[in-house]
Image (cartoon, rainbow, N blue to C red):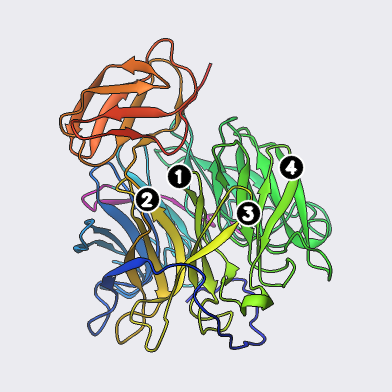
Amino acid sequence: MKPFKSIVILCAVWVSAGNLASAQSLTTLHKFCAKSGCPDGAVPTGLVQVTNGDLYGTTESGGAYGYGTVFKMTSSGKLTTLYNFCAQSGCPDGAYPLAGVVEAANGDLYGTTSVGGAYGSANTGGTVFKITPEGTLTTLHSFCAQNGCPDGELPQQGVVEVANGDLYGTTEVGGAYDEGTIFKITPGGTLTTLHSFCAQGGCPDGEAPGGLILATNGDLYGMTPFGGAHNGGTVFKITQAGTLSTLHNFCRKKGCTDGANPGESSLVQASNGDLYGTTFSGGAYGNGTLFEITLKGALTTLYSFCSPQIACADGAIPEGNLVQAIDGNLYGATYGGGLNHNIYTGGTVFKSTLSGTVTTLYSFCPQGPCTDGDNPNPLLLATSGELYGTTNSGGARTGDGTIYMLSVGLGPFVETLPSLGKVGAAVTVLGSDLTGTTSVTFNGTAATFTVVSESEIKTTVPTGATTGTVEVTTPSSTLTSNVAFQIKQ
């Protein structure tokens, strides 16, 4: 259960359409809540691939105490529950994690719970936590330590790490004006509130912020689903020191084709340097858009979902984050729509060119009882080239969600952690079948390296390196990073 702001569903219209793309290969790896009491969790959120090659994620509920879990899963589908939230009376360790976790440079995983903590309850508070890959959890901060929650309350999104190891995140409510915050927290747990939303009447800076991303210029970017000049949400930039600028105001009025309510998902910075994101309403047909926005705020609407010409077979209500693959295309998911579904059931996986040509790759729940899942969450592109994701419902008899793998013909690649740094900075390269690697280069400049395992290489940014892709040569192939590594001066 999410005791927070929501968009009220007023109606649903059944649609039907033919296939928009050739069939893709989907494999359901895990169906949650297969047993009474849901010991494996229920309602999974996003996934992340870590340096040991495994996938980690959270469930919003279920587990030993019913308040959510942290789990890991091998690429073949073996799931292990690492932690069950609310292990003690009052949930001092937090409850209901609504977002996944992120792996930091120190090898630990960080995330948030939406409620609970030392000062919260089943409906208030929230935490920031650290968990080791083996499952030892430490609560770093409990929100709402003071009356009025000036430090924020109800964090629904995860955190993002910057170069110095600090983590940045958001809360949906709380802060000086009770409309959400942006915060910074050190790995040791010292939290600083950087911005409180809605400092002026009408909330021109937005309200209820979603997730953040770190762009190549060192600034953080995000969106708010509400508020702004036209009450349709915003795109904003905030420096690491806390100076916020509103870049775009979405519009909820009729005829505003730029979309409205960009939701709580994060933006993605593509290889061309621009940011891409989605709105879950508005656009030409009222059911969401795909957009591009420059770092300075020039926005272009690329695609409007739920086209009446194809009866919403292209999907509706895109909510999850986008990912860019090695082929240069963007991949994402819509909450509803697809073949033979109304706009609030089913859902799709789609790809889009950077110019906005959208192709539907898979429609969920082609027929009852949705054993392949229903209402997909954000995607993960693994270094094997496979897409992994979770669904919010469907699957087993209880309908509490799935983990799936979708093969769409993408090849393997490598990922760098972090994706920017100075000459001499330590970098971890994540991939698959890395044993026997003979060279690592940064935009053509050779680097020294150590192969840690078949999925991990340790290296440093070499002298003379310039911004560009990282290439790893193995006995069988040459693997390229999916994003350019940015050299900091």
Quadrant for residue 86, please give it: bottom left
Mark 1 / mark 4, whichever is N-terminal: 4
* Residue 479 on image: x %, y %: 32, 34
**Disc number placed over residue 477 in the picture, else none:** none
Q: Main secondary structure of the magenta part?
A: loop
Residue type at mark 1?
A: Asp
Viewer-side residue, 279 vs 483: 483
- Pointers 1 and 4 in contact (C-beta within 8 Å): no
Residue at figure coordinates x 43%, y 58% from the top left: 379
- The residue tagged 3 is 356
Mark 3 / mark 2, whichever is N-terminal: 3
* Residue 211 on image: x %, y %: 55, 52
- The residue tagged 1 is 327
Mark nearer the viewer, 1 or 4:
1
Residue type at mark 3?
A: Gly
Mark 1–mark 2 Cα distance, whole angstroms, equals 7 Å
SS under mark 3: loop
Residue at figure coordinates x 58%, y 60% from the top left: 358
- The residue tagged 4 is 297
* Residue 260 on image: x %, y %: 72, 64
Mark 4–mark 2 Cα distance, whole angstroms, equals 31 Å
Q: Which portion, as a residue range, is magenta? A: 132-148
SS under mark 1: loop
Mark 4 / mark 2, whichever is N-terminal: 4
**Disc number placed over residue 410 in the picture, else none:** 2
Residue type at mark 4?
A: Gly
- Pointers 1 and 2 in contact (C-beta within 8 Å): yes
Residue 482 left/right relative to 66: right
Mark 1–mark 4 Cα distance, whole angstroms, equals 26 Å
Residue type at mark 2?
A: Leu
Residue 137 counted in the magenta span: yes
Quadrant for residue 386, please give it: bottom left
